[in-house]
């Protein structure tokens, strides 16, 4: 269990021991902090027939789970080539939960990411949240719970995981990856503070791409006319990463202007107006969602970079 999840695990165990666990849980929090790891540990514990604080790993249930063949565990997620959980998947899930339990005391449904349910799927699930099926526990995972209908959220007990503080995240990363503090901190910055995403950056070449983004932004502050050049250096970066990073950088610049604490990538003398920075951050988030559509990504990028470059004038 990741150290920053311990408090959530204790909460869950306490509820379970007091027999006060809701029949639907929503694990919320940013990407890359271990929501699915927490959900999996909960699923295993709820199915295990032992009484240790963690799933025992030895009982029949644990063995079946390990082999991916537990008959009381159900999981839905967007099927191949689809970004959405569809209504048929939810209907199949509900009818499976209706069947009598075969091995464990409970049936477990694990839905992730819950915010990928389309409207019909969410409506279908709502029925089983309103009239819970006997001994079923539903575990929903979402990094964007605000996009789920309020009716769904209000019927779940939410477990909100926040980013661990940078000291804890950095300490954990240095210990588990053995990388020096400077690399770890750059990875954490690129990951917006999410330790698991930072860990994957440390194993890949993505940090070089992130460095290109920060270098490009700094260049534009002194050479606002260099938009085309900077834009071409960023052309090869995966759009999802690129927009996430531009959002992180604009957000960090805004934070630095608000607090007066120097940002790790901006020149110390940078003095940028706050409001446009916040608007640029928002626009980067919007553009990230648009990057999945056939819109001309290069035009969006040029436009965003021009607005960024204007801030230094
Ligand atoms: Zn067990």
Image (cartoon, grey):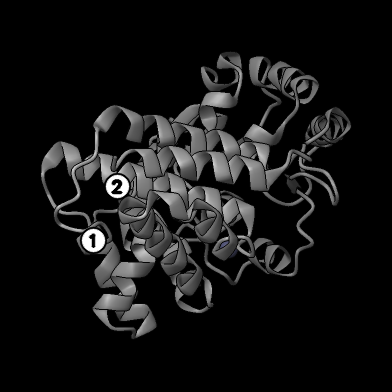
Is residue 298 something one can see in this rendering? yes
Query: In which quadrant of the rendered image does the N terminus lie?
Result: bottom left
Residue beneath the point at 50% across and 68% down: 209
- Which element is circle 2 on? helix
Q: Up-down: is 9 above or below 158?
A: below
Q: Nearer the viewer, residue 61 or 225?
A: 225
Q: Is residue 295 above or below residue 94?
A: below
Q: Residue 194: image x %, image y %?
A: 40, 56
The circle drawn on residue 264 is: 1
Q: Is residue 55 left or right of residue 281?
A: right
Give ligand 1's quarter of the image: bottom right
Q: Quadrant of residue 264?
A: bottom left
Q: Are marks 2 and 1 in contact (CB under 8 Å)?
A: yes
In percent of width and height, residue 127 lies at: 73, 16
Q: Tag 1's secondary structure?
A: loop
Density class for disc 2 (Cα within 10 Å; few <14, some 14-19, many ≥20) is many
Residue at the spot 47% in from the left edge and 62% down from the top edge: 197
Residue 262 coordinates in the image, percent (x, y): 15, 54
Disc 2 designates what residue?
252
Q: Vertically, is 171 above or below 301? A: below
């Amino acid at each position: 269990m990741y150290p920053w999840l311990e408090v959530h695990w204790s909460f869950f165990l306490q509820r379970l021991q007091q027999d006060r666990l809701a029949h639907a849980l929503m694990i919320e929090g940013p990407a890359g902090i271990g929501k699915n790891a927490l959900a999996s540990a909960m699923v295993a514990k709820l199915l295990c027939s032992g009484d240790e604080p963690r799933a025992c790993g030895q009982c029949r249930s644990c063995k079946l789970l390990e082999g991916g063949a537990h008959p009381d565990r159900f999981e839905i997620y967007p099927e191949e080539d689809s970004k959405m959980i569809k209504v048929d998947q939810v209907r199949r899930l509900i009818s499976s939960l209706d069947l009598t339990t075969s091995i464990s005391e409970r049936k477990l449904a694990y839905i992730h990411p819950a915010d990928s349910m389309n409207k019909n799927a969410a409506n279908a699930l709502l029925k089983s949240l309103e009239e819970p099926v006997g001994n079923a526990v539903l575990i929903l995972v979402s990094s964007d719970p605000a996009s789920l209908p309020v009716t769904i959220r209000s019927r779940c007990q939410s477990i909100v995981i926040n980013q661990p503080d940078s000291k804890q995240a950095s300490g954990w990363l240095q210990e588990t990856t053995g990388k020096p503090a400077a690399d770890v901190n750059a990875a954490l910055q690129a990951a917006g503070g999410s330790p698991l995403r930072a860990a994957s950056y440390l194993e890949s070449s993505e940090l070089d791409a992130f460095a290109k983004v920060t270098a490009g932004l700094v260049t534009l502050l002194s050479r606002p006319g260099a938009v085309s050049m900077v834009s071409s250096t960023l052309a090869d970066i995966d759009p999802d990463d690129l927009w996430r990073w531009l959002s992180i950088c604009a957000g960090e610049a805004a934070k630095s202007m608000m607090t007066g604490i120097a940002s790790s990538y901006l020149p110390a003398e940078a003095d940028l107006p706050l409001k446009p920075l916040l608007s640029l951050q928002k626009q980067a988030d919007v553009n990230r969602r648009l990057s999945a559509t056939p819109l001309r990504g290069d035009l969006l990028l040029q436009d965003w970079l021009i607005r960024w470059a204007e801030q230094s004038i």
